[in-house]
Image (cartoon, grey):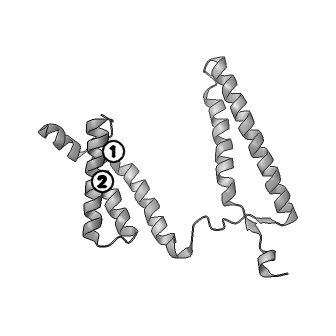
Amino acid sequence: MTEATNRKKAIGADLIIPLAGAAYAVYYVWSVRDFPIEAQMSGMILAGMLLFLVLLYLVRIGVGLAAGRYGMGLGDFLGPKETRVSRGLFFVLVLASVYAIGHFGFTLTTFGFLALSFVVLGIRPVGRAILVAAIAALVGWLFFVVLLGTRFPMGPFEQLMQAVF
């Protein structure tokens, strides 16, 4: 046999969504226990169907593991090795922006996230990346905050604009 036919398909990453869905279904049923019976019943029916489908999927995976067709590795879940550092930095930027939005507001956080993301992704020249991030943040502020009246967290920029206008 060749190496290609001996390789097992890595299915560890394929289990993330089904297991998360099953966990959410159980959480939902648990969280609606004080709701009216209609909400409880519809939640139990939908959760039951989802759990049944996840169970079927897990049986299929179990059969494949027993037959040696699958392995529990993550496969290409993290992407090519060459891009893992930039992907990791991007993930850290996402977490940092979620944390920062309460302190710096929508517009400044969006600007910082986009500008740093462009730099991490290698967009050059850096000045153009910063200009695009600034324009995108301002357009987002105009559209979401000014036109739609969305209640995003306010930061220094939003407070300044509120004082000026």
- Residue nearest the viewer, comparing 97 with 77: 77
Instruction: Give above or below for 115 relative to 106.
Output: below
- Residue 161: quarter of image: top left
Q: Amino acid at mark 1?
A: Gly
| Residue positioned 57% across, 68% down in the render | 79
Specify the farthest residue to the left: 164
Say how many tags the image has: 2
Residue 31 image offset from top left, x and y in percent: 61, 30
Residue 30: % across, % down: 65, 31
Left or right, 84 with reference to 108:
right
Mark on residue 136? 2
The mark found on residue 2 in the picture is: none
Is label 2 in contact with label 1 (beta carbons under 8 Å)?
no
Residue 103 image offset from top left, x and y in percent: 30, 47
- In this rendering, position of residue 11 left or right of residue 156: right
Residue drawn at 39 percent across, 68 percent down: 120
Label 2 or label 1, whichever comes before in sequence order: 1
> Tag 1's secondary structure?
helix
Q: Residue at x 39, y 55 (%)?
A: 96
Separation of residues labelled 2 and 1 (CA atoms) = 19 Å
Residue type, numbered disc 2: Ala
Q: Nearer the viewer, mark 2 or mark 1?
A: 2
- Residue 154 appears in which quarter of the rendering? top left
Q: Residue at x 56, y 72 (%)?
A: 80
Q: Nearer the viewer, residue 38 or 2?
A: 2
In this figure, which residue is indicated by the disc labeled 1?
Answer: 102
Q: How crowded is the residue under tag 1: few (<14 C-alpha within 10 Å), some, or many (20+)? A: some
> Quarter of the image containing the C terminus?
top left
